[in-house]
Image (spheres, rainbow, N blue to C red):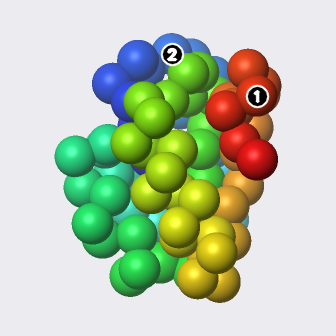
Amino acid sequence: MISTGRATRITWGPPKVLNEQHWHFDLLDEGQLDRLADYRCVVLPETGPLRPETVSRLDDYVRRGGKLFATGNTLAAGEWR
């Protein structure tokens, strides 16, 4: 999961669900995007607007076969192609 530092109640919902299902996950921030290749799936839990560099890195991650799951208003402003 990627955090943009804007933690809200909604942001912590996905980690709670993953914990309850006993799924292993890591929390990353935008400064750790160089680690994306280590993951089969990235979850963006209601992050709100993302920096253009972050969108570019996520786009590259998906083009290379990574899976992206975004919830809420994440990328709703047309940031994703």
Q: Which residue is mark 1?
A: 78
Horizontal side of 5 relative to 10 (left or right) equals left
Count of numbered labels shown in the rendering:
2
Q: Position of residue 58 (x, y in %)?
A: 53, 57
Rendered position, 24 above or below 46: below
The amino acid on which the numbered mark 1 sits, given as a three-letter code, is Gly
Horizontal side of 18 relative to 35 (left or right) equals right
Q: Position of residue 78 (x, y in %)?
A: 76, 28
The secondary element bearing badge 2 is classed as loop
Q: Is residue 13 visible?
A: no
Task: Work out how far the residue at label 2 is from the one at label 1, CA to CA, in angstroms.
Answer: 22 Å
Judged by depth in the image, the label closer to the viewer, 2 or 1, is 1
Rendered position, 79 above or below 6: below
| Front in this rendered view, residue 30 or 54 | 54
| Front in this rendered view, residue 9 or 5 | 5
Horizontal side of 13 relative to 73 (left or right) equals left
Q: Which residue is mark 2?
A: 8
Q: Position of residue 63 (x, y in %)?
A: 64, 75
The amino acid on which the numbered mark 2 sits, given as a three-letter code, is Thr
